[in-house]
Protein backbone atom coordinates (compact mmCIF):
# COMPACT_ATOMS: atom_id res chain seq x y z
CA UNK A 1 0.00 0.00 0.00
CA UNK A 2 1.46 3.38 -0.98
CA UNK A 3 1.40 6.46 1.24
CA UNK A 4 -1.62 8.01 -0.52
CA UNK A 5 -3.74 4.86 -0.13
CA UNK A 6 -2.75 4.53 3.53
CA UNK A 7 -3.55 8.17 4.22
CA UNK A 8 -6.96 7.92 2.57
CA UNK A 9 -7.78 4.71 4.43
CA UNK A 10 -6.91 6.26 7.78
CA UNK A 11 -8.81 9.45 6.97
CA UNK A 12 -11.87 7.36 6.17
CA UNK A 13 -11.55 5.46 9.44
CA UNK A 14 -11.20 8.59 11.56
CA UNK A 15 -13.49 10.95 9.66
CA UNK A 16 -15.98 10.91 12.51
CA UNK A 17 -14.08 9.07 15.24
CA UNK A 18 -11.60 11.92 15.60
CA UNK A 19 -14.20 14.01 17.43
CA UNK A 20 -14.70 11.43 20.19
CA UNK A 21 -11.39 9.59 19.96
CA UNK A 22 -9.81 10.75 23.22
CA UNK A 23 -13.04 10.39 25.20
CA UNK A 24 -13.77 6.86 23.98
CA UNK A 25 -10.23 5.44 23.99
CA UNK A 26 -9.47 6.28 27.61
CA UNK A 27 -11.62 3.32 28.67
CA UNK A 28 -9.59 0.64 26.92
CA UNK A 29 -6.21 2.05 25.80
CA UNK A 30 -4.83 1.39 29.25
CA UNK A 31 -1.24 2.03 30.29
CA UNK A 32 -0.64 5.09 28.14
CA UNK A 33 -0.14 7.43 31.06
CA UNK A 34 2.13 4.92 32.79
CA UNK A 35 4.33 4.90 29.70
CA UNK A 36 4.41 8.71 29.61
CA UNK A 37 5.18 8.99 33.32
CA UNK A 38 8.14 6.62 33.06
CA UNK A 39 9.81 8.32 30.07
CA UNK A 40 13.32 9.50 31.12
CA UNK A 41 13.39 12.61 28.92
CA UNK A 42 16.21 15.12 29.33
CA UNK A 43 16.39 18.77 28.26
CA UNK A 44 16.71 19.28 24.50
CA UNK A 45 16.17 15.62 23.68
CA UNK A 46 14.17 14.82 20.54
CA UNK A 47 11.07 12.67 21.04
CA UNK A 48 8.95 11.24 18.21
CA UNK A 49 5.52 9.67 18.59
CA UNK A 50 4.61 7.53 15.60
CA UNK A 51 0.83 7.41 15.20
CA UNK A 52 0.33 10.53 17.32
CA UNK A 53 -3.39 10.84 16.50
CA UNK A 54 -4.99 13.80 18.27
CA UNK A 55 -1.73 14.83 19.95
CA UNK A 56 -2.99 13.81 23.38
CA UNK A 57 0.23 12.12 24.49
CA UNK A 58 2.50 14.82 23.06
CA UNK A 59 0.67 17.58 24.95
CA UNK A 60 1.04 15.67 28.22
CA UNK A 61 4.76 15.18 27.58
CA UNK A 62 5.34 18.81 26.60
CA UNK A 63 3.72 19.88 29.87
CA UNK A 64 6.01 17.57 31.84
CA UNK A 65 9.21 18.25 29.87
CA UNK A 66 9.04 21.82 28.51
CA UNK A 67 12.74 21.87 27.56
CA UNK A 68 12.48 18.86 25.22
CA UNK A 69 11.54 18.80 21.53
CA UNK A 70 8.54 16.79 20.41
CA UNK A 71 7.49 15.48 17.01
CA UNK A 72 4.36 13.64 15.94
CA UNK A 73 3.78 11.61 12.79
CA UNK A 74 0.48 10.20 11.62
CA UNK A 75 -0.83 8.74 8.37
CA UNK A 76 -4.16 10.54 8.70
CA UNK A 77 -4.37 14.18 7.64
CA UNK A 78 -7.70 14.48 9.43
CA UNK A 79 -6.25 13.30 12.73
CA UNK A 80 -3.34 15.71 12.32
CA UNK A 81 -5.79 18.55 11.71
CA UNK A 82 -7.50 17.60 14.96
CA UNK A 83 -4.13 17.53 16.71
CA UNK A 84 -3.27 20.98 15.37
CA UNK A 85 -6.54 22.31 16.74
CA UNK A 86 -5.89 20.71 20.10
CA UNK A 87 -2.38 22.20 20.25
CA UNK A 88 -3.74 25.69 19.69
CA UNK A 89 -5.51 25.41 23.04
CA UNK A 90 -2.25 24.78 24.91
CA UNK A 91 0.95 26.64 25.77
CA UNK A 92 3.09 24.02 24.07
CA UNK A 93 2.37 24.36 20.37
CA UNK A 94 5.86 25.82 19.82
CA UNK A 95 7.57 22.68 21.16
CA UNK A 96 5.51 20.15 19.14
CA UNK A 97 5.86 19.66 15.39
CA UNK A 98 3.41 17.49 13.45
CA UNK A 99 4.11 15.70 10.16
CA UNK A 100 2.06 13.50 7.86
CA UNK A 101 3.72 10.24 6.89
CA UNK A 102 3.89 6.47 7.25
CA UNK A 103 5.66 4.73 10.10
CA UNK A 104 7.87 2.66 7.80
CA UNK A 105 8.94 5.63 5.68
CA UNK A 106 9.54 8.56 8.02
CA UNK A 107 13.13 9.65 8.67
CA UNK A 108 14.62 12.00 11.23
CA UNK A 109 15.64 14.26 8.36
CA UNK A 110 11.97 14.60 7.42
CA UNK A 111 11.48 16.17 10.84
CA UNK A 112 14.18 18.76 10.16
CA UNK A 113 16.66 17.13 12.53
CA UNK A 114 20.42 16.94 12.05
CA UNK A 115 20.80 13.68 13.97
CA UNK A 116 18.75 10.65 15.01
CA UNK A 117 16.17 10.67 17.79
CA UNK A 118 16.52 10.09 21.52
CA UNK A 119 13.09 8.51 22.03
CA UNK A 120 10.38 6.99 19.82
CA UNK A 121 6.91 6.17 21.14
CA UNK A 122 4.34 3.68 19.85
CA UNK A 123 1.11 3.98 21.83
CA UNK A 124 -1.38 1.32 20.68
CA UNK A 125 -0.19 1.74 17.11
CA UNK A 126 1.64 -1.46 16.14
CA UNK A 127 -1.55 -3.52 16.54
CA UNK A 128 -3.10 -1.36 13.81
CA UNK A 129 -0.32 -1.86 11.27
CA UNK A 130 -0.33 -5.13 9.27
CA UNK A 131 3.36 -4.65 8.44
CA UNK A 132 4.42 -4.00 12.03
CA UNK A 133 7.67 -6.08 11.82
CA UNK A 134 9.10 -3.71 9.19
CA UNK A 135 7.89 -0.71 11.21
CA UNK A 136 9.70 -1.96 14.33
CA UNK A 137 12.93 -2.50 12.45
CA UNK A 138 12.71 0.88 10.73
CA UNK A 139 12.10 2.68 14.03
CA UNK A 140 15.32 1.27 15.46
CA UNK A 141 17.29 2.77 12.59
CA UNK A 142 15.97 6.23 13.61
CA UNK A 143 17.38 6.09 17.14
CA UNK A 144 20.74 7.27 18.45
CA UNK A 145 22.96 4.80 20.30
CA UNK A 146 21.38 4.52 23.79
CA UNK A 147 18.15 5.89 22.32
CA UNK A 148 14.94 4.28 23.54
CA UNK A 149 11.90 2.76 21.88
CA UNK A 150 8.83 2.93 24.14
CA UNK A 151 5.80 0.77 23.37
CA UNK A 152 2.42 0.22 24.97
CA UNK A 153 -0.01 -2.12 23.22
CA UNK A 154 -2.39 -5.00 23.71
CA UNK A 155 -0.92 -8.20 25.13
CA UNK A 156 -2.41 -11.69 24.92
CA UNK A 157 -4.95 -11.29 27.82
CA UNK A 158 -3.93 -14.81 28.83
CA UNK A 159 -4.92 -14.30 32.47
CA UNK A 160 -8.33 -12.79 31.70
CA UNK A 161 -11.61 -14.71 31.19
CA UNK A 162 -12.15 -16.15 27.74
CA UNK A 163 -15.43 -14.27 27.26
CA UNK A 164 -13.61 -11.01 27.93
CA UNK A 165 -10.92 -11.75 25.36
CA UNK A 166 -13.52 -12.71 22.76
CA UNK A 167 -15.56 -9.56 23.37
CA UNK A 168 -12.49 -7.33 23.34
CA UNK A 169 -11.07 -8.77 20.12
CA UNK A 170 -14.45 -8.47 18.41
CA UNK A 171 -14.74 -4.84 19.49
CA UNK A 172 -11.21 -4.02 18.35
CA UNK A 173 -11.76 -5.60 14.94
CA UNK A 174 -14.43 -2.98 14.25
CA UNK A 175 -11.65 -0.39 14.47
CA UNK A 176 -9.11 -2.38 12.41
CA UNK A 177 -7.09 -3.21 15.51
CA UNK A 178 -5.60 -6.70 15.73
CA UNK A 179 -3.66 -7.50 18.93
CA UNK A 180 -0.49 -9.35 18.00
CA UNK A 181 1.37 -11.31 20.72
CA UNK A 182 4.31 -11.81 18.34
CA UNK A 183 5.29 -8.17 18.85
CA UNK A 184 6.83 -9.11 22.20
CA UNK A 185 8.60 -12.10 20.71
CA UNK A 186 10.04 -9.93 17.97
CA UNK A 187 11.24 -7.33 20.47
CA UNK A 188 12.99 -10.03 22.48
CA UNK A 189 14.66 -11.48 19.41
CA UNK A 190 15.70 -8.06 18.09
CA UNK A 191 17.22 -7.24 21.48
CA UNK A 192 19.07 -10.57 21.55
CA UNK A 193 20.33 -10.06 18.01
CA UNK A 194 21.62 -6.52 18.59
CA UNK A 195 22.65 -6.72 22.24
CA UNK A 196 20.06 -4.13 23.26
CA UNK A 197 18.52 -3.78 26.70
CA UNK A 198 14.83 -4.67 26.84
CA UNK A 199 12.42 -4.27 29.74
CA UNK A 200 8.84 -5.57 29.55
CA UNK A 201 6.01 -5.10 32.03
CA UNK A 202 2.45 -6.44 31.78
CA UNK A 203 -0.67 -4.79 33.08
CA UNK A 204 -3.05 -6.80 35.24
CA UNK A 205 -4.30 -9.94 33.51
CA UNK A 206 -1.79 -9.37 30.71
CA UNK A 207 -4.30 -6.95 29.19
CA UNK A 208 -1.50 -4.83 27.76
CA UNK A 209 2.28 -4.60 27.89
CA UNK A 210 4.77 -1.80 28.35
CA UNK A 211 8.17 -2.23 26.73
CA UNK A 212 11.34 -0.12 26.75
CA UNK A 213 14.00 -1.09 24.22
CA UNK A 214 17.33 0.74 24.68
CA UNK A 215 19.47 0.62 21.57
CA UNK A 216 23.15 -0.17 22.09
CA UNK A 217 24.85 -0.12 18.70
CA UNK A 218 25.58 2.94 16.60
CA UNK A 219 24.23 1.23 13.48
CA UNK A 220 21.24 -1.10 13.41
CA UNK A 221 21.01 -3.49 10.48
CA UNK A 222 17.57 -5.15 10.48
CA UNK A 223 17.85 -8.97 10.66
CA UNK A 224 15.37 -9.36 7.80
CA UNK A 225 17.81 -7.56 5.49
CA UNK A 226 20.70 -9.87 6.31
CA UNK A 227 20.72 -13.00 4.10
CA UNK A 228 21.96 -15.26 6.90
CA UNK A 229 19.20 -14.01 9.22
CA UNK A 230 16.24 -14.24 6.81
CA UNK A 231 14.05 -16.25 9.18
CA UNK A 232 15.51 -15.00 12.44
CA UNK A 233 12.35 -13.30 13.62
CA UNK A 234 10.07 -16.13 12.60
CA UNK A 235 7.67 -13.72 10.90
Image: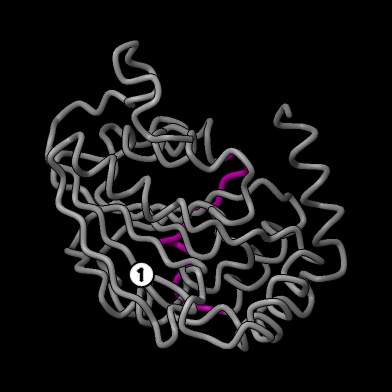
Residue 229 placement (x, y as % from top left):
31, 20
From this view, report whether residue 32 is shown above or below residue 80.
below
Confirm whether the magenta stretch covers residue 23: no
From this view, report whether residue 144 is shown above or below residue 125.
above
Judged from this view, the residue extending furthest toward the top is 227
Residue shown at 71%/76% (left/top)?
21
Identify the image quadrant of residue 32. bottom left
Residue 183 placement (x, y as % from top left):
44, 52
Q: Is residue 182 left or right of residue 17?
A: left
Confirm whether the magenta stretch covers residue 101: yes
Residue span colored magenta: 90-102
Identify the image quadrant of residue 83. bottom right
Q: Is residue 74 left or right of residue 69?
A: right
Residue 200 placement (x, y as % from top left):
27, 66
Residue shown at 58%/88% (left/top)?
161
Judged from this view, the residue extending furthest toward the front is 162
Residue situated in front as seen by the camera: 13 or 172: 172
Residue situated in front as seen by the camera: 28 or 22: 28
From this view, report whether residue 18 is shown above or below residue 48.
below
The secondary structure type at the circle numbered 1 is strand
Structural crowding at the residue carrying mark 1, measured as other residues with C-alpha within 10 Å and reported as few (<14), some (14–19) or many (≥20): many
Residue situated in front as seen by the camera: 69 or 3: 3
Residue 198 placement (x, y as % from top left):
20, 56
Query: Would you name the residue on which mark 1 appears?
Result: 210
Amino acid sequence: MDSLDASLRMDQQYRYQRYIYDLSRKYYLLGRDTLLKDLPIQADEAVLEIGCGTGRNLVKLAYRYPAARFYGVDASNLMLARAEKNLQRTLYAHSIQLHQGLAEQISWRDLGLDEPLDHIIFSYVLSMIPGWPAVLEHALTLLKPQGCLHIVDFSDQAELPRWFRTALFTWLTWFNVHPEPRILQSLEELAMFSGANLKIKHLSGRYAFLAVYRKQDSHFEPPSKLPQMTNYLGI
